[in-house]
Every structure is written in structure tokens, then in C-alpha cells.
Amino acid sequence: MVSEAPPFWWQKPGVQSALLSPFGWVYGRVARRIMDRRVRRAVAAPVICVGNLTVGGSGKTPTALSLAEAAMRRGLKPGFLSRGYGGVAQHATIVDLAKDTARLVGDEPMLLAAKAKTVVSPDRIEGAELLVREGVDLIIMDDGFQSAWLVFDQALLVIDARRGIGNGCVFPAGPVRAPVIDQIRHADALIVVGEGEAADPMVRMSARAAKPIHLARFRPRNSAQFRFRNCLAFAAIGDPDKFFATLEKAGVRVARRQRFPDHHPFTNDEIDDLLTEAELYNLDLITTSKDYARLKSGRGRAEELLQKTSVLEIDLVYDSPHAPDAIIDAAVTAFKRRRASL
């Protein structure tokens, strides 16, 4: 998958998407065959997969973190499983915050590991089995909905309410990872994150398929300390504009903004530019927790940028506070049912 989504993906279908549609048709057929794969490996713990319909950010990692928090309140021992996008780990690896960096294991696993035991692995089965050996009794898988070999006890699709599925075309003609109808068919529930109407068609489709629909939104945790400050905001995530909008809604004055591709490793020149621009206009630097984690892998003036940059911390809040527990209950029930059938 590409790290920077082309603008036409989020516009009405046009010439570019039409020219790429034959490739999208082929990609979609392959994705459908993979999702329909009948031979999947089961592991000795419930598995919740948190995926999304499209390429780019939709809120998967905050969703995974919210489920882990709910599991811990119930006395469970959750663990995260990630491919470690952006990292170089070749085998199942337990993330160690004391020595690992985003350069090695990826930026999202660094965030997840601050909450619960996290394993990155190109081989999801190997990673899941390592978590089970580590005593984890609930596996929360960040991404992998369309391609994993694992048996899921709950498969969640997260969708951004503001952007929806863009032009609705399958990659590379659009941002959709696989034919929408097939993704909904394999999902157990839909989670709509944020405000807007772009996800409404998916909500209606999920409702017709009798899938549970959970509504959630981002709530800044520490926005009061940034209120009415003039900031230079920068982000290298799937949808930087979502981050900027969250800041402005929290009362932060976003005087300048810098966008970078998702998972982008900041270069020395880019770091110099950010520091120079902030000093020139007398602005406070602010970014996302994922970008901050990635900067820790940086070199040169990256340490200086870290010291001068604040992080907007966010929580995912569900309209129904019982939603995370309902998802966990469904996963545990499905796990017990399949174990009893062996």
C-alpha cells in the first residue's frame, strides 16, 4: 500500500480513477479470494481484529487502545499484534520500549506497547502464538483484516465519518482495500469515528446486513494547555487534516500546518525547516503521539525538535460506554464456541 493517498481518491470518480479501474478490478478479485480463504489458523486466545475499509488513517490504533483499556478493567491481560509497518523486524518480536525505536518496530507498535504487551511480526500466526506463550488472554490485532491467516473471533471495520470511503473505488483507483460488499460480509461490526455523513452509506449497508454499529469520536485529553496558543502543527499520519481540525475544535490556534505522508521518517532538512519556521513566527510546535514516537528514531536535530514539540493526546470515546465491553463479550463468546466445537 502507498503511504500518501493521492487527492483524487477523496474526490468524485473521474478520469484518473477510471483509467486505474481495471487494475482495481484485478486487485479486488485477489483481495476477495484472500478474504474468502477457508484455511485459517486458530490460536488459544480470543482474537479481535481492528481493520479499516480504506488505505490511510481511520482510527484503528485508538480503537485498539480503547479495547485494551476496557479489557484491563475486566481483569483480562490483552496483548497487541501488529505487522510493524515502517519497521524492519523480520521475525516475531516483543516490543521493548527501553531499547526499541520506531525505526526498528514501527511507530504504531511503540504507542501500543505503552499500554500492553505488543508483538510485531510479518507472520501474524507466529506473532499470535508468541503472545499466547507470554500469557496474553485477549489478542487485539491492529490491521490485517483483509489478509491475515488467523481465525478472528471479532472482526471490526473502522471508518472515518468525515472521509468515508472516498471515491468508493478499489486500490489503486481509489482508497478501498477490497470490494466493500465483501468487507462488510466478513466483518462482525462497524465502528464509525468522528463527525460527518460520509460514512452513512456504509452504516446503511452494515445495518441491512444486521451488523452492530458503534459510534465514537476523538476527545483531546490535554488540550487545555494549548488553548489560545499560536501553534505550528505538523503530522505524518493518514489524514493530517483530521489532526488539525481536532486542534482547532479544542481552541488551539493553528497558525501554520505541515503535512507529510503517513509513517514518514522526518529528514534532517525537514526537521531544520520545522524548527526554523517555528522560531521565525514565534510558534509552539505540536504534533501527534505517533509522530512523536517516530521522531525518537531520528538523528541530527531530531532530539532538539522532540524537546520543543508538544503532543496532543487523545482518547476514543464511544457514544455508548458499553460498546467496548460488547465487542469483547462477543469475541470471548465466539472463542469459547469454537473451542467447544473442536
Image: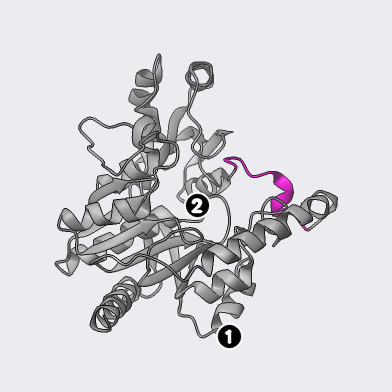
Q: Residue furthest right?
A: 15
Nearer mark to the viewer, of 1 and 2: 1
Q: Looking at the picture, does residue 14 appear above or below residue 313?
A: below
Q: Which residues are magenta?
A: 2-12
Residue 92, quarter of picture? top left
Q: Residue furthest top?
A: 300
The image's colouring method is one colour
Mark pair 1, 2: CA separation: 34 Å
Going from N to C along the chain, the mark reached first, 1 or 2, is 1
Image quadrant containing the C terminus: bottom left
Marks 1 and 2 in Cβ contact (< 8 Å): no
Residue 284 screen position, x and y as percent: 44, 29
Q: Looking at the picture, does residue 166 appear above or below residue 100?
A: below
In the figure, is residue 52 to the left or right of 290? Answer: right
Which kind of residue does numbered mark 2 sit on? Lys
Magenta-colored stretch includes residue 148: no
Residue 189, quarter of picture? bottom left
Instruction: Say if residue 171 shows up in the picture.
Output: yes
> Which SS class for mark 1?
helix
Residue drawn at x 69%, y 62% is 168
Instruction: Say if residue 220 shows up in the picture.
Output: no
The residue closer to the viewer here, 222 or 130, is 130
Checking the image for residue 176, the label placed there is: none
Residue for badge 1: 208
The residue closer to the viewer here, 54 or 147, is 147
Which kind of residue does numbered mark 1 sit on? Arg
Image quadrant containing the N terminus: top right
Residue for badge 2: 249
